[in-house]
Image (spheres, rainbow, N blue to C red):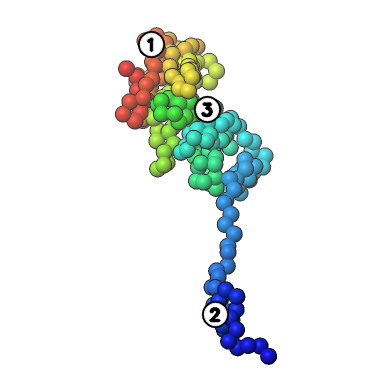
Amino acid sequence: QPNPNARVAGGEASDTVATPPPVATQPVREVRTPQTMTDDQVLARVRADRQVPANVAVRFRTRANVAEGREPEQVFALGGAIVIHGPAYQGGQGYFFFEAVAAEADLLSVETADLTGDGQHEIVFTFKQNLGEFQRDILTVLQLTENGIQPLLRVEVARYHGDAERIVNAVDLRRRGRTATLTINPGETRGWDATTWPFAGFANDGVAPLLLPWVDEARRYRYADGVLVTP
């Protein structure tokens, strides 16, 4: 017969063994960090969102730090629009879309350069604008901010009257290390001079005027008070 008063080694005598209460548990949910969209995924999404046909090719593709963070974004043109995306932009899950011109053929160039000295590149693009029987090229500098885009400069750099008459300024976007400078020279003229130039002045439309070779000198732009200006 077991002795009811016998001691259990290391403890008091006991008729029962206490069972620990059950521990409440919560289901563990797997947390997945959203993956940055690949270049192909972004392009497919832009085409679907904006109804851009597959035969419209990507142009002027480049990588530069134009948005928040230190990682570079991809910048490219699709039709007449400029698209920006990257891991730091909206967590890699979105893109920026800016309709620069209506027609793809009118978007002449897209590049980037740090013209403000803040370490982030600005978007520099040139497009053609029809003025009835005349045409002009406009160079635009945009800065991407958390609130959207901020125009820093709009300047006319060429004017045409068919193939016979034209003035084309020389644009010198020179990169020096991490920053860049912008200088515009009067450039070349064909068919027009001081006596045959048909315009009395330039429209007050927010676009800096074309440089005329017979009267203007080169202009170098610098950043001041939120815009690019000349001395």
- The N terminus appears in which quarter of the rendering? bottom right
Other residues around mark 1 within 10 Å, as few (<14) / some (14–19) / many (≥20) = few
Q: Marks 1 and 2, Cα distance to the nearest angstrom?
A: 105 Å
Q: Is residue 27 above or below residue 69?
A: below
Residue marked by disc 3: 111
Numbered disc in front, either 3 or 1:
3
Q: Which comes before the other along the chain, label 3 or label 2? A: 2
Q: Going by the image, does 4 lie left or right of 147?
A: right
- The C terminus appears in which quarter of the rendering? top left
Residue type at mark 3 is Glu
Q: Is residue 62 above or below residue 94?
A: above
Is residue 20 or residue 174 the one in the foreground? 20
> Percent x, y for residue 184?
43, 16
> Percent x, y for residue 122?
46, 30
Q: Which residue corresponds to the image point at 52% horizontal and 46% vertical from the top-left?
A: 91
Residue type at mark 2 is Glu
Quadrant assignment, res 212: top left
Numbered disc in front, either 1 or 2:
2
> Percent x, y for residue 37?
60, 45
Q: Marks 3 and 2, Cα distance to the nearest angstrom?
A: 84 Å
> Percent x, y for residue 115?
43, 25
What label sits on residue 217 in the rendered view? 1
Other residues around mark 2 within 10 Å, as few (<14) / some (14–19) / many (≥20) = few
Q: Which residue corresponds to the image point at 59% horizontal and 31% vertical from the top-left?
A: 61
Is residue 195 or residue 211 the one in the foreground? 211
Q: Secondary structure at mark 2?
A: loop
Residue type at mark 1 is Glu
Q: Is residue 3 above or below residue 215?
A: below
Q: Secondary structure at mark 3?
A: strand
Q: How many marks?
A: 3
Q: Secondary structure at mark 1?
A: loop
Q: Which comes before the other along the chain, label 3 or label 1? A: 3
